[in-house]
Amino acid sequence: MAQRISGERIVLALAAPVLAILLSVAICSVLLATSGKNPFDAWNVMITFVSGSDHQVLILNRTTTYYLAAAAAAFGFRMNLFNIGVEGQYKVAALFAAFVGTQVDLPSFLQIPLLLITAMLVGGLYASIAGLLKVYRGVSEVISTIMLNSIATAIVGVLLVPGIFAPKVSGTSNSIQTSPVSESSHFFSFTTNGGQLWGFLVIAIAVGVIFQLTLTRTRFGFDLRATGRSETAATASGVNVKKMIVISMVVSGAIAGLIGLPELLQNSFYYGQTFQQNLGFLGISIALLGRNSPIGIAFAALLFAFLDAAGSVLPLPANGEFPFEIVDVMKGTIVICVVVAYELVRRYGLVRQQKRVGAQLAAQAAAATETKEVSA
């Protein structure tokens, strides 16, 4: 019985995201057909895209960044905290990490940990502002983190000017960026047939493992989940809710600090005005699709990386000149559909549970009646 119920729970857990993806594909197919395009051709182009080994490496590299963004958002969500400020946290953290990488040149085994710690400290400290405001002033973290995103943009604009974090430039160049980080700051890569697979994938896996172990194997993880479900009940059981809120925001921000490092240390090697944008908001979508589970968001991050990478070839004339916007539509509809799908699956699960409990109670009542009849 326990195995059957466990299997049923797994099926129900998978049903919602699968249903959301199928609904999204159906909606996008209708939109493509309405615009005069053959949707089957579009899906064929995207599926064929994955067959190339270089494309697979590209997808995995993007998955690494997307996973870190989703993990940062998911950690806050597990505490019932909506850290909308992941966007600002990773931008400020990446900027400071880039600056340290240009000013310090230690051996790689010291330099890279220094940059990781710098990014995590900056991201955690910046996120702690929202946690402290919530604890001591009752300010909603949604409002404070949204405002902190705008402030982060201003901070980057103030610091990323020639003479401060960016070198002084001569002439009329409009390109404003930090100097390239030192050679010792370059993170290792795996050489494959499809190109260089970012070694930061190892860091992303480590974050996921630590995330899962923290949630399921530590007292802190139990307190975090308990507080997220009911602050009143957690307080009654002796949990310091205010402390948990601040720590959770700091940890979420520290993870967010890592988001920009794959691009910084493995691709561009500098921070500029064109540095990756909107990864924080994308991470929120991925976390929702993955139900804030480290394993779930891994598959969700892989899906979104596939959509972005494969969708980039849709507008090419050789592939039918499909609108690239269809990828954004698909990601948006997945997020909307997943909310509906989870609710439908939740209600179905409740009905199934009620029927199962009702059947057990009826069986017990019948057994009790039979026993009385035999005794009489």
Image (cartoon, grey):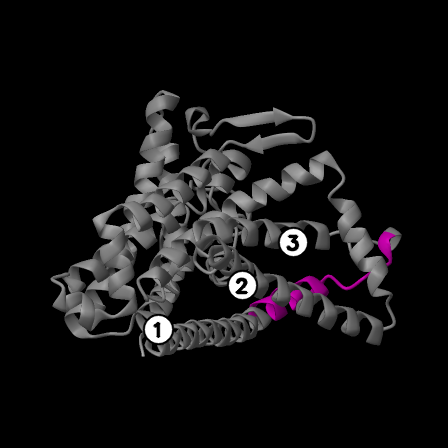
Which badge, 1 or 3, is on the more N-terminal residue? 3
| Magenta-tinted stretch | 319-335
Mark 1 highlights which residue?
371
Whether residue 136 is visible to the viewer of this picture, yes or no, is: yes
Numbered badge on residue 12: 2
Which badge, 1 or 2, is on the more N-terminal residue? 2
Cα separation, mark 3 vs mark 2, equals: 28 Å
Classify 10 Å Cα crowding around label 3: few (below 14), some (14-19), many (20 and above).
some
Rendered position, 20 above or below 267: below
The amino acid on which the numbered mark 3 sits, given as a three-letter code, is: Asp
Cα separation, mark 1 vs mark 3, equals: 65 Å
> In this orientation, which residue lies closer to the viewer: 259 or 284?
284
Whether residue 164 is visible to the viewer of this picture, yes or no, is: no
Mark 3 highlights which residue?
308
Residue 222, horizontal then vertical, whole percent: 25, 55
Element at badge 3?
helix
The amino acid on which the numbered mark 1 sits, given as a three-letter code, is: Thr
Rendered position, 43 above or below 141: above
Quarter of the image holding residue 239? bottom left
Residue found at the very far top of the displayed protein: 107
Residue beneath the point at 22% across and 51% down: 220
Residue found at the very far front of the displayed protein: 376
Classify 10 Å Cα crowding around label 1: few (below 14), some (14-19), many (20 and above).
few
Q: Is residue 326 magenta?
A: yes
Residue 1, horizontal then vertical, whole percent: 46, 57
